[in-house]
Every structure is written in C-alpha cells, then in structure tokens.
Image: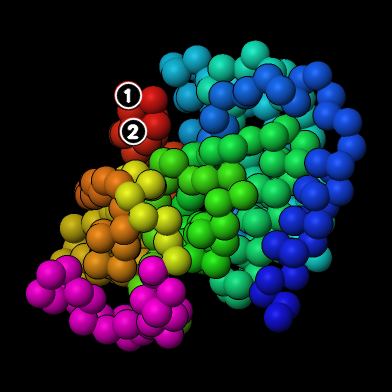
Amino acid sequence: MRKHIWFLLAFVALALGAAQPAPVLATIQRQVPTLYLHGHRSGPRAMAAFIKTAQAEDHATSVLTATVNNDGAVKLHGRWPVASHRPLIKVVFKNNRTLRYGKISDWLAAVITTLQHRYHIRRFNIVAHSLGNAAVLFYELRYGQYTQLPQLQKYVAIAGNFDGVPGVHRPRAAHRMGPGGKPPWMAPAYLQAMHMRSHFPKYQVSVLNIYGDLGDGRHWDGKVNNVSSRSLRYLLGSRLRSYEALEFTGPLAQHRLLRTNPAVIQATDHFLWP
C-alpha cells in the first residue's frame, strides 16, 4: 500500500485545490517544461551543463529547482513566469544514495504533482542520467496510466542502468544482446519492469537512449554495461511512440562524463527542440 501513498495524497490535494476559485493565471497555458534528473551520488550541479547550453543555444529558460527530501516533501526555488520559453526545471534528491527504485519514483511523482498543482502543467519532458532513469521508468510504470496526471512526452535516457549495474546486480563481464535485443541476463528490477510494462503509456512517449562505450572491449561506459542501457528497447519498444539509440565512444563516453559531453548535450537538445 505504501507505494501508492504519494499518489493518493497528491490526488486529494489536487481535488481540494480544484474546489477553490481558480486564479486568473491558471487558465493560461505554460509551455511544456523539461525536467533534469541527476544520478546516484550526484547533486544540484550534475546536470548544469545541459541547462547552461539549452539557455545559451536553444533560447530555453531555467525557471525552477525542485528539491525533494527523504520524506518526499518538495521545495520549489525560483520563478516561473507564464511567458517563459522552453522552461527548464532541475530536480534534486537530497538523499542521493538510495537504490530503492520505488522510493525515488515516488519522489519524482511528488515533484510532478507539485508542479501540476502549482503551475497546472499537463505535459512534460525529462532528461535523466544514470540512476535517475530508474526513477523515470518506475514512475511511468506505476503512475503513467493515470491520465489525470501530467503526461510524459519526450524522454532522454543517458547511461541508464535499466538491467542492472555490473558488480552490483550482475557479474562484471561483457555481455551481448540476444535475439530481438533481449538481454542475456535480467536483474530483479528489470524482471519487475517486464511484468509491469503494459502500464507504460502506449504510443505516447518518444525516447532518445544515449550510452557510452569506452572501446576497451568490455562494452561499457566504465560503470554500466551497454547491454543494460540498450535493454530499454526490448522492455518498452512496443509501447513507445518512437525510439532512437545513440552510442558515444572515446574518453568523453565515460559514465560520469556523458553528462558534460558537448556532443551528448547537442543530441539531447536537438531531440527536445528539433
């Protein structure tokens, strides 16, 4: 039951808010925001290169930082004027060490429902790095079917550990994809996602899946195997509106450096705002 607590609380809050007279600005439609979500043991500056480039080259506007504490309480910092062009929102989990996918997806749900209640958003895009992708995936598997919530449109997954991390969920060995892109080994969370994938919104979400290969013959970015990152297609391919994968190589394809790699940032922005 605990996994639905945040959704129920948020839904009640929205219902109570709807019972009050709506302010005039609530009827004005804001542009679709893009949320940036960091990975394990990262923090407020992790996705700064994406936001800085989007502002400088794509006429985007950084509007808010949403900080979530361990209890799921959300604090918003900044201003979001109605006329903001391509609004950008940084999402920060104060507890950046947990590996509990249900918990981090609840934290993301708290952010999204807070933005819905405060700013009346209906749709959103998201860019996630590393473990942040687990929050996105399990948020959509658990809450994506609720059409009264804001709906995900575009999703950029960077260095996603969809089928586990070597040395944590699976052996440290190179693996190759099986027939049809099926991963040769499935982590417990991936098996759980397989059982829930019918909950993922159908033909709604466009995905750009970015991963790195250091070129040392191990087919990984120094932390996550390419098989794990690429396993997203086998998991969700039949549910997606579109899917594209990009492999980056060389020193800047290292797991942490992917989020500051100019080519990765350029590909992300072109996908979001072609």
Residue 198 screen position, x and y as percent? 39, 69
Q: Give the SS element for disc 2.
A: helix
Q: Are the residues flagged by discs 1 and 2 in contact, CB closer than 8 Å? A: yes
Over which residues does the magenta segment extend? 170-198
Residue 125 screen position, x and y as percent? 49, 39
As drawn, 119 above or below 254: above
Q: Amino acid at mark 1?
A: Pro
**Residue 148 among those drawn in magenta:** no
Q: Residues within 10 Å of mark 2 (few under 14, many from 20)?
A: some
Residue on which the image places disc 2: 271
Q: Amino acid at mark 2?
A: Phe
- Residue under the image location 66 percent in, 64 percent down: 106
Q: Which mark is residue 274?
A: 1
Residue 1 screen position, x and y as percent? 71, 81
- Using the image as rendered, state which of residue 75 and residue 52 is in the foreground: 75
- Using the image as rendered, state which of residue 78 and residue 193 is in the foreground: 193
User: Is there any visible trace of residue 116 in the rendered image?
Assistant: yes
Q: Residue furthest right?
A: 20
